[in-house]
Amino acid sequence: QVQLVESGGGLVQPGGSLRLSCAASENIFEINAMGWYRQAPGKRRELVASVTESGSTNYADSVKGRFTISRDNAKNMVYLQMNSLKPEDTAVYYCNADPPIEWYGGNYAWGQGTQVTVSS
């Protein structure tokens, strides 16, 4: 069974910071690059950052220089440090493998996500 549990979202003012955490089951974490995705209302889910098992990272242009993705291989955890947040960063944030796993063993792989709202 796959498990992805995101946490750390909330309401923050523009310019503020948040740190998201994701606990991933070992069957996803150990063989994949991991990514953070987001989906804003009325928009498609998009990949914002990814990190390989060795620690190489990639970022969407919209978050480059503001967001930092990291992973703790010993704890099967993935993190997203978000600084200088903007209203357009408002979305539900999810973690998953990169590329994402939609179904695993007959179960829907995506977690419930964590809401990030950037507003004054």
Image (cartoon, rainbow, N blue to C red):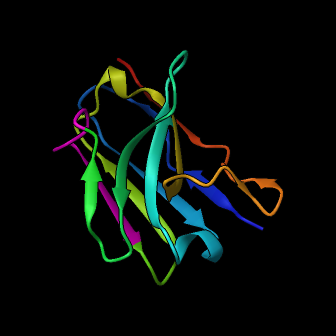
**Stretch of the chain drawn in magenta:** 61-71
Q: Residue at x 49, y 54 (%)?
A: 99
Compared with 5, 65 (above or below) is above
Number of numbered callouts drawn: 0
**Residue 105 left/right relative to 15:** right
| Position in image of residue 14 (x %, y %) | 28, 25
Magenta residue check for 85: no
Magenta residue check for 63: yes
Compared with 83, 14 (above or below) is above
Q: Residue at x 32, y 77 (%)?
A: 54
Furthest residue toward left: 65
**Residue 74 left/right relative to 84:** right
The C terminus: image quadrant: top left
Q: Residue at x 61, y 55 (%)?
A: 101
| Position in image of residue 71 (x %, y %) | 39, 69
Q: Depth check: give the residue in front, 91 or 61.
A: 61
The N terminus: image quadrant: bottom right
Q: Quadrant of residue 114?
A: top right
